[in-house]
Image (cartoon, rainbow, N blue to C red):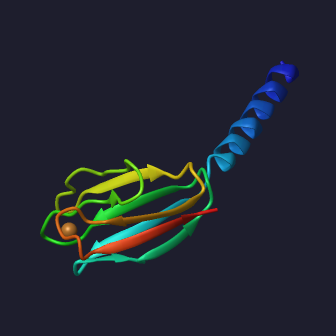
Amino acid sequence: MRRGIRAALFLAAALATGAHAAGKSHAVTIEGMKFVPEQLQVAAGDTITWTNRDIVPHTVTSTVSKVESGDLQSGKSWKFTAKTKGEMPYVCRLHPGMKGVVVIK
Ligand SMILES: [Cu+2]
């Protein structure tokens, strides 16, 4: 029985370590026709969530890769896990004057 408890504790510790290795979470708010913050620095493996707080739809569309959120309606969020190191500039496809950049280290 003791062994069973030890195994369970070991498993819990392994799971906790795994969760940590999964990367940090970052948030970008889309409001007032802007990405806030416009520039975000993350590590490879981190996840970024964009949330549209405007009443009009927006997108997160990379200008250097195929990363594309699709139309994000008001109040909706979209997650992306950064994998490739480097700069990922992006725009809103519907309002190309809206610009942001994710720097992946
Ligand atoms: Cu937009």
Residue 32's image quarter?
A: bottom left
Of the pair 65 and 70, the residue shown nearer to us: 65
- Identify the image quadrant of the C terminus: bottom right
Q: In this image, 54 relative to 60: left or right?
A: left
Q: Residue furthest left?
A: 56
Q: Residue 41, how many percent across, how many down? A: 56, 70
- Identify the image quadrant of the N terminus: top right
Q: Is residue 48 above or below residue 66?
A: below
Q: Is residue 8 above or below residue 101?
A: above
Q: Residue 7, how many percent across, how many down? A: 81, 25
The residue lying at 32 percent from left, 51 percent from top is 68
Q: Residue furthest front?
A: 64
Q: Residue 10, how many percent across, how many down? A: 80, 32
Q: Residue 22, how many percent across, how many down? A: 62, 46
Q: Is residue 17 above or below residue 6?
A: below
Of the pair 57 and 1, the residue shown nearer to us: 57
The residue lying at 50 percent from left, 71 percent from top is 40
Residue 74's image quarter?
A: bottom left
Q: Residue furthest right?
A: 2
The residue lying at 18 percent from left, 70 percent from top is 95
Q: In this image, 12 relative to 67: left or right?
A: right
Of the pair 70 and 79, the residue shown nearer to us: 70
Q: In this image, 49 relative to 4: left or right?
A: left
- Report the image quarter containing ligand 1: bottom left
Of the pair 84 and 13, the residue shown nearer to us: 84
The residue lying at 44 percent from left, 66 percent from top is 27
Q: Residue furthest bottom?
A: 32
